[in-house]
Image (cartoon, rainbow, N blue to C red):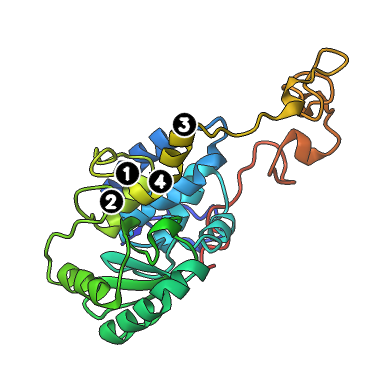
Amino acid sequence: MTIDAGPATDGTPAGRSRPGYDAETTARLAADAAQIVARYPESRSALLPMLHLVQSEDGYVSRDGILFCAEQLGLTAAEVSAVATFYTQYKRHPNGTYTVGVCTNTLCAIMGGDAIFDELSDHLGVGHDETTEDGAITLERVECNAACDYAPVMMVNWEFFDNQTPGSATDVVDRLRAGEPVAPTRGAASVCTFKQMSRVLAGFPDGRADEGVGAGEPTLAGLRLAREHGWTAPADETDAEAAPDGGAPAGGAPDAGEAQSSAERKPTTDADVDPGGKAESPGTKPDPSKGADA
């Protein structure tokens, strides 16, 4: 889709249209974007959830999505692209309906993670960050799924599938491709699509956060043993030592506004006064189209 850019004010030749969402999509996304921006004291801080928002629309961070974020937040497309290409959760090409991430970090790898990934790669005919021809599965190696107590772990759109084997993982992806409902080991009662999960990551809950089991027995084993034996963490002795002047405890950080806190430091550079600001003249805004092809 393209929209009429109007008079050339951003370097676009007159009469040429530029990429962008249609009017209806733009209005709908802009309403969501306004809610996101309202959560932050500085609008540019909303960029990360905004990228998830446009990803929920297109299934990846498209050029249209980059331009939309830039225009909504007063950034250049180059600035938006720099962030979108830094984080692996943002996809710069069409993603599958389901992202299947296999942890191949140290513990999961030695527990079978590498074997699981290799089996899925052969079974699906794709490698890392590649998508099956039917558009159903994007396969990824993941450095850590933060679930070492359930190794080896696989995630589908960030839902946990614990204690996997090559056979069980293959069964999961086959059922997903067949359109069957699939339930993760913990968490939500079913796996949603990549677009739906992207909207949740943008900060729009789907009401399923409290479904299912959160922390299972392996996660709680240490806590249970500590309670049975009356174990507690040792107190930090420095917390009890007040500073001579009555300020922060010895060795601790001062509270905001107190002597030696960052709030007391006087601005010394332009960046201190306007963090992330530009050297443009007052009242001007960055050109959102700059770097849109990044």
- Between the residue at mark 3 and the residue at mark 4, the CA separation in whole angstroms equals 37 Å
* Residue 118, image x, y percentages: 37, 83
- Quarter containing the N terminus: bottom left
* Residue 237, image x, y percentages: 74, 27
- Between the residue at mark 4 and the residue at mark 2, the CA separation in whole angstroms equals 16 Å
Residue 186's disc number: 2
Residue carrying label 3: 39
Q: Between tags 3 and 2, which lies in front?
A: 2
| Labels 2 and 1 touching (C-beta < 8 A) | yes
Q: Amino acid at mark 1?
A: Gly
* Residue 34, image x, y percentages: 41, 35
- Between the residue at mark 2 and the residue at mark 1, the CA separation in whole angstroms equals 6 Å
Lower position in the chain sequence, tag 3 or tag 4: 3
Q: Secondary structure at mark 2?
A: loop
| Labels 3 and 2 touching (C-beta < 8 A) | no
Q: Secondary structure at mark 1?
A: loop
Residue carrying label 4: 221
* Residue positioned 76% across, 28% down in the render: 252
Residue carrying label 1: 214
- Between the residue at mark 3 and the residue at mark 1, the CA separation in whole angstroms equals 27 Å
Q: Secondary structure at mark 4?
A: helix
Q: Is residue 212 in view from this perspective?
A: yes
Q: Nearer the viewer, residue 225 or 87?
A: 225
Q: Circle 3: is it few (<14), some (14-19), or many (20+) Cα within 10 Å?
A: few
**Left or right of 74 on screen, residue 151:** left
Lower position in the chain sequence, tag 2 or tag 1: 2
- Between the residue at mark 4 and the residue at mark 1, the CA separation in whole angstroms equals 14 Å
| Residue that extends furthest to the front in the rendered view of this protein | 229
